[in-house]
Amino acid sequence: MPASRKYPDELRERAVREVHTSGRPVAHVARDLGIRKKEGWRGWVRRAEAGQGSRPDLLTTAERNGCPTARGNS
């Protein structure tokens, strides 16, 4: 059984959306939402950016899961 998450998915999505729409620093938005571990939350933002394709230096979800068509691995 997987470990339970400290923060619900809805909060994660809201936090990532808030950073993108407001342009405010991650630490400021995290404080406003009551998120204490800012480093872990920065990871949420990075993964969301990678999944949207706005971070070419990171793998997308499909690439991490081994999708053969991702990054031309056909």
Image (tube, rainbow, N blue to C red):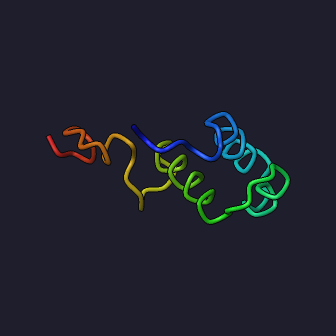
Left or right position of 20 against 66: right
Q: Position of residue 49 (x, y in %)?
A: 54, 49
Residue 54 or 39: which is nearer the viewer?
39
Left or right position of 45 against 62: right
Q: Residue furthest top?
A: 10
Left or right position of 32 against 17: right
Q: Which residue is painted at 29% across and 42% down in the image?
A: 65
Q: Quadrant of residue 56?
A: bottom left
Q: Dividing the image into 4 quarters, which one contains the C terminus?
A: top left
Q: Dividing the image into 4 quarters, which one contains the N terminus?
A: top left
Q: Position of residue 59 (x, y in %)?
A: 37, 53
Residue 11 or 65: which is nearer the viewer?
11
Q: Residue furthest left?
A: 74
Q: Is residue 26 above or below residue 44?
A: below
Q: Which residue is painted at 85% across and 53% down in the image?
A: 32
Instruction: Please count the marks in the image.
Output: 0
Q: Which residue is painted at 79% across and 55% down in the image?
A: 29
Q: Residue furthest front?
A: 1
Q: Position of residue 48 (x, y in %)?
A: 54, 46
Residue 34 or 2: which is nearer the viewer?
2
Residue 44 or 74: which is nearer the viewer?
44
Q: Position of residue 34 (x, y in %)?
A: 80, 52
Q: Which residue is painted at 72% across and 51% down in the image?
A: 19
